[in-house]
């Protein structure tokens, strides 16, 4: 086992004893399963050399860990990890983040919010913006379905009629997809999780945009992989940095948003898309393209899946942003052989995958002509909300980095170098949930940026609280 200090642990060295720091480094390796029960730990001399501490410090650390029952000594053979089970928790995965910018904590602030909490930092539409009447009609139709739909597990591939609809919609884009290239899942997040289970092993490297959707970072943390960020520009990932990262780190996957990028609102250009795909193909890199915001685009932008034909690209998505976050149903589009492997993983991990009830609700709503009208109206409402939010924010000195072509988000810089985490913490005390920039940034270089959901910003109190929070953070 190669135990080493992370930058976070190095930072802690100034206010912790050297013995305590060694104990934490070893404990973290055990907690995150980097070393298994019964496995031998490094020798005292090797660990002292690795951590640049004295052998006596390692002796004391090992003795204390043995007293805790976490490790044990074999006379003349060194120290070993004890057989007792140690829970795996995401909070113990390095690097350790300030709670205000931890993806798990920021997600929970919105998901656990009490009624009346204002949530311009969340990533979804207000219920009043969703097609409630269409969903109610679909629920009434569902109630008249045969007993099997309401009481049985679904097909391992998912609702056949919905998969046919998805194939037709993909073909309309210019992406011919066979039925055996589509798998329905419990959600878009589950689709990503299954792909990660199929293609990744602990210790692999994954490229993400910097900044990127913060739950990408939380999910990849759960898979115990190394995450490398590539700066994201107004036209997509910085191609030179992308190529350099591929050469240096030899990643297994590149995980990105298509359509309207989260959080920046930027759009991938055709030139960048072609260059990124060329680099990926030449280096055996698999691209996972999260297409969840596609319906919110006024006009379609380049798609890596379309350019590639699902050879090196996997498309995932769901309808939680346009239909209902309650009717959870996601999908994966990929090569047929990969879909077969994903079906087995889905059966192994949740047995039946997408709920036939949720899938039927989605299918019935999509099949109605009203859904197209709903999406068109949604784009118009978002465009209006975007202009209004940008105007109100600019009065506070909060300026968007760019004006997106559409979608939910404005990625804004705070004035005077204000720290977004401080502003977010002050606003939370007043019942307003914000999303500070560093929760999206693997490099933690977005400290004065913040993502705003324009659909959640109609209440004037949001701007009052934001102004007060900014003054308090100065």
Image (cartoon, rainbow, N blue to C red):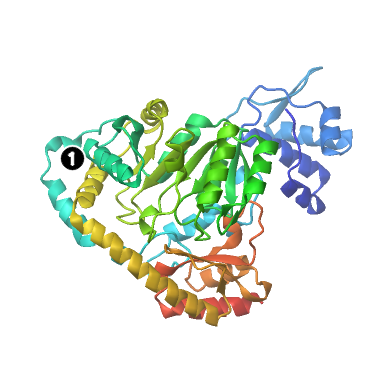
Please state the horizontal and vertical placement of residue 316, each as a whole percent of the image. Answer: 41, 42
Q: Secondary structure at mark 1?
A: helix
Q: Nearer the viewer, residue 372 or 416?
A: 372
Q: Looking at the rendering, in which quadrant would you find the N terminus? A: top right
For residue 281, which quarter of the picture? top right
20 displayed left or right of 279 = right
Label 1, residues with CA under 10 Å away: few <14, some 14-19, many ≥20: some
Q: Is residue 444 above or below residue 359?
A: below
Q: Nearer the viewer, residue 113 or 446?
A: 446
Please state the horizontal and vertical placement of residue 235, each as a whole percent of the image. Answer: 55, 56
Q: Nearer the viewer, residue 270 or 385?
A: 270
26 displayed left or right of 132 = right
Residue 222 seen by the camera: yes
Please state the horizontal and vertical placement of residue 210, each as a whole percent of the image. Answer: 60, 53
Residue 88 seen by the camera: no
Please state the horizontal and vertical placement of residue 63, each as a whole percent of the image. Answer: 78, 32
For residue 88, which quarter of the picture? top right
469 displayed left or right of 62 = left
Q: Which residue is mark 1?
A: 150
Q: Looking at the rendering, in which quadrant would you find the C terminus? A: bottom right
- Point 66% across, 56% down: residue: 444
Residue found at the very far front of the displayed protein: 271
Q: Nearer the viewer, residue 257 or 422?
A: 257
């Amino acid at each position: 086992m190669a135990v080493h200090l992370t930058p976070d642990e190095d930072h802690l060295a100034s206010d912790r004893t050297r013995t305590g720091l060694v104990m934490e480094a070893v404990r973290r390796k055990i907690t995150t399963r980097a070393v298994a029960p019964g496995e031998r730990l490094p020798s005292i001399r090797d660990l002292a050399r690795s951590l640049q501490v004295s052998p006596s410090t390692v002796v004391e650390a090992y003795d204390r860990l043995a007293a805790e029952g976490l490790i044990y000594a074999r006379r003349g053979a060194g120290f070993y990890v004890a057989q007792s089970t140690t829970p795996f928790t995401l909070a113990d995965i390095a690097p350790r983040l300030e709670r205000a910018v931890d993806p798990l904590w920021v997600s929970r602030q919105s998901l656990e919010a009490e009624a009346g909490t204002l949530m311009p930092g969340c990533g979804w539409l207000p219920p009043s913006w969703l097609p409630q009447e269409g969903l109610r009609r679909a629920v009434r139709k569902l109630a008249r379905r045969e007993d099997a739909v309401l009481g049985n597990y679904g097909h391992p591939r998912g609702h056949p009629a919905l998969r046919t609809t998805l194939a037709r919609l993909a073909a309309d884009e210019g992406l011919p997809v066979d039925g055996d290239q589509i798998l329905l899942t419990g959600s878009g997040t589950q689709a990503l999780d299954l792909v990660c289970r199929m293609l990744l092993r602990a210790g692999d490297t994954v490229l993400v945009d910097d900044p990127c959707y913060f739950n990408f970072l939380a999910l990849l943390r759960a898979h115990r992989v190394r995450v490398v960020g590539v700066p994201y520009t107004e036209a997509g990932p910085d191609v030179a940095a992308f190529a350099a990262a591929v050469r240096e780190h030899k990643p297994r996957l590149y995980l990105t948003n298509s359509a309207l990028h989260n959080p920046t609102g930027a759009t991938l250009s055709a030139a960048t898309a072609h260059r990124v795909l060329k680099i990926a193909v030449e280096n055996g890199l698999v691209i996972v393209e999260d297409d969840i915001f596609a319906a919110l685009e006024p006009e379609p932008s380049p798609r890596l899946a379309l350019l590639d034909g699902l050879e090196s690209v996997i498309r995932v998505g769901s309808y939680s942003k346009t239909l209902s976050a309650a009717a959870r149903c996601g999908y994966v589009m990929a090569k047929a052989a990969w879909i077969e492997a994903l079906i087995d993983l889905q059966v192994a991990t949740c047995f039946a995958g997408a709920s036939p009830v949720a899938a039927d609700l989605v299918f019935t709503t999509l099949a109605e002509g009203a859904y197209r009208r709903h999406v068109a109206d949604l784009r118009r409402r978002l465009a209006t909300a975007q202009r209004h939010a940008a105007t109100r924010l600019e009065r506070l000195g909060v300026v968007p980095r760019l004006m997106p072509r559409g979608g939910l988000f404005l990625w804004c810089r705070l004035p005077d170098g204000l720290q977004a985490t401080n502003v977010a913490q002050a606003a939370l005390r007043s019942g307003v949930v914000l999303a500070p920039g560093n929760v999206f940034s693997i490099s933690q270089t977005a400290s004065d940026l913040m993502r705003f959901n324009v659909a959640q910003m109609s209440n004037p109190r949001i701007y009052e609280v934001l102004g007060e929070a900014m003054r308090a953070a100065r």
